Structure formats: structure tokens, C-alpha cells
Amino acid sequence: MSARMHLSPAHGSHPQDPGAEQFARAAEVLGLLADRTRLALLHTLGKGEADVTTLTAACDAARPAVSQHLAKLRLAGLVDARKDGRRVVYALTDNHLARLVGEALGHADHDVSGSRRHD
């Protein structure tokens, strides 16, 4: 197994050795992902834009809770919101989040299913 592992092949512009600011921001983002509802919201938004009604159904959570989680994600700069008539539509701010969530869920699937891990 390689000593250096990357989540995606598109990593050329990232620093080789992250500094304190990168570690602090990564820890902040991972902390936000450490909530089942927020993780489900980001997973759903990784498939495309969605409104609160769609996100509430996809996350199996109460609408007020979904709205509060979306507000935290917006404040952290992980999701954007735009008006579409009377609806507010949410989207991920970048594809790194979709890949990060996908990797976390893939890892969890190995644990839950007992399937063999791969490199």
C-alpha cells in the first residue's frame, strides 16, 4: 500500500505539506460532517441542487432541523443557496465535498457490510 493516498486524481494544485490553516479548516469541515443529518444533506446535494422539501424527505429529518443544519453548512461555506421563485435551492460549493462524503460512506459500507477493504 502506498504511503501517500489521495481521494481524487485532481490534486495537483494542493499543497504538498499542508500548514496550520489547512489543518484547522479541514478539522472544521470534518467536524461538520460528523453529524448524520448534515452528512445525509451533503450526500443528497452531491447528486445536484435540491430544495428544503426534497432534502427533508431524503434525510428523514424534521424540516426545522434540516433548515438549521443547512444554515450551519451555509455559514461554513459548504453549501450555497439561491432563490427560485418562492423556493430556496441549495447546492454544494465544490465537488471536493461530494468526493469526501463518498469516501466516508464507502469506508462505512466496508465496516457495515464486512466486505474486504481495498487500496
Image (cartoon, rainbow, N blue to C red):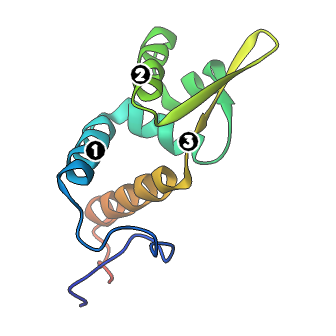
- Camera-side mark, 3 or 2: 3
Q: Amino acid at mark 3?
A: Thr
Residue under circle 3? 93
Residue 92: % across, % down: 56, 41
> Which percent across, then down, holds residue 93?
55, 41
Give left or right: position of 82 versus 100: right
Foreground of the two, 27 or 86: 27
- Quarter of the image where the N terminus is located: bottom left
Please report the residue visible at 45 percent of the width from the left and 72 percent of the height from the top: 11
| Horizontal relation, residue 106 to residue 85: left or right | left
Residue flagged by tag 1: what amino acid is it? Arg
The numbered mark, 3 or 2, whose residue comes first in the sequence reads 2
Look at mark 1 in the image and give the residue it sits on: 25
Rounded to the nearest angstrom, the CA distance separating label 3 from label 2 is 15 Å
Q: In the figure, is residue 74 to the left or right of 89?
A: left
Kindly state the secondary structure of the residue where label 2 is placed.
Answer: helix
Displayed quadrant of residue 110: bottom left
Residue in the picture at 46% in, 76% down: 12
- Is residue 50 something one can see in this rendering? yes
Of 118 and 18, nearer the camera is 18
Q: Does any portion of residue 58 appear in the rendered image?
A: no
Q: Which residue is mark 2?
A: 69
